[in-house]
Amino acid sequence: MSVHLMSVFLWFVASLAAACAGPQVAGETSPPLVTTADGHVGTVVRVRGHVVRAKFADLVQGEGLSVYCLGERLPDALIDTIVTVQGTLAERDTGARETPDGAISQGTAPGTTSLVIEGCEVAP
């Protein structure tokens, strides 16, 4: 194979790999990897931890920070593994509520709030 043909082939492979990686913005950086919610609620973050399938949503139990991953369930193959997820960190009231007819909804203890990742996805 000639040197020119080889360089064209390598350019093609590199271009294909870049296209598969998605659009890149100059100066774009990954969201910060956080271990505490302090100062991060309302911002896009990454959280690394052990994935547990919970009734409410998949739970990512990180060191110092556990979050429910809202949105689509994570793939079954990721349950009981360590992954990094990203999305907007938020605090939600997840406590059970009593309806006017006396029924109690499912949820955590009344008055409880939980940290969640909205738009949760596995980080690249």
Image (tube, rainbow, N blue to C red):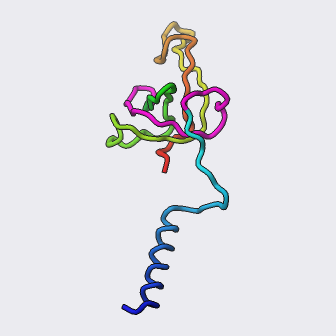
Res. 114 image quadrant: top right
| 45 drawn magenta | yes
Where residue 90 appears, x then y in whole percent? Answer: 61, 30
Q: Residue furthest top?
A: 102
User: Which residue corresponds to the image point at 58% horizontal and 20% vertical from the top-left?
Assistant: 93
Q: Count of labels shown?
A: 0
Task: Say whether residue 116 is left or right of residue 77.
Answer: right
Res. 116 image quadrant: top right
Q: Quadrant of the N terminus?
A: bottom left
Q: Residue furthest bottom?
A: 2
Q: Nearer the viewer, residue 5 or 23?
A: 5
Magenta highlight range: 35-57
Where residue 73 appears, x then y in whole percent? Answer: 42, 39
Relative height, residue 26 to residue 52 (above, below): below
Where residue 33 appears, x then y in whole percent? Answer: 55, 39
User: Which residue corresponds to the image point at 50% horizontal and 62% vertical from the top-left?
Assistant: 21
User: Which residue corresponds to the image point at 64% horizontal and 26% vertical from the top-left?
Assistant: 38
| 50 drawn magenta | yes
Where residue 32 appears, x then y in whole percent? Answer: 59, 41
Relative height, residue 74 to residue 100 (above, below): below
Task: Say whether residue 38 is left or right of residue 71.
Answer: right
Q: Nearer the viewer, residue 1 or 90?
A: 1
Task: Say whether residue 42 is left or right of residue 123.
Answer: right
Q: Residue furthest front?
A: 3
User: Which residue corresponds to the image point at 45% horizontal and 26% vertical from the top-left?
Assistant: 56
Task: Say whether residue 8 is left or right of residue 118.
Answer: left
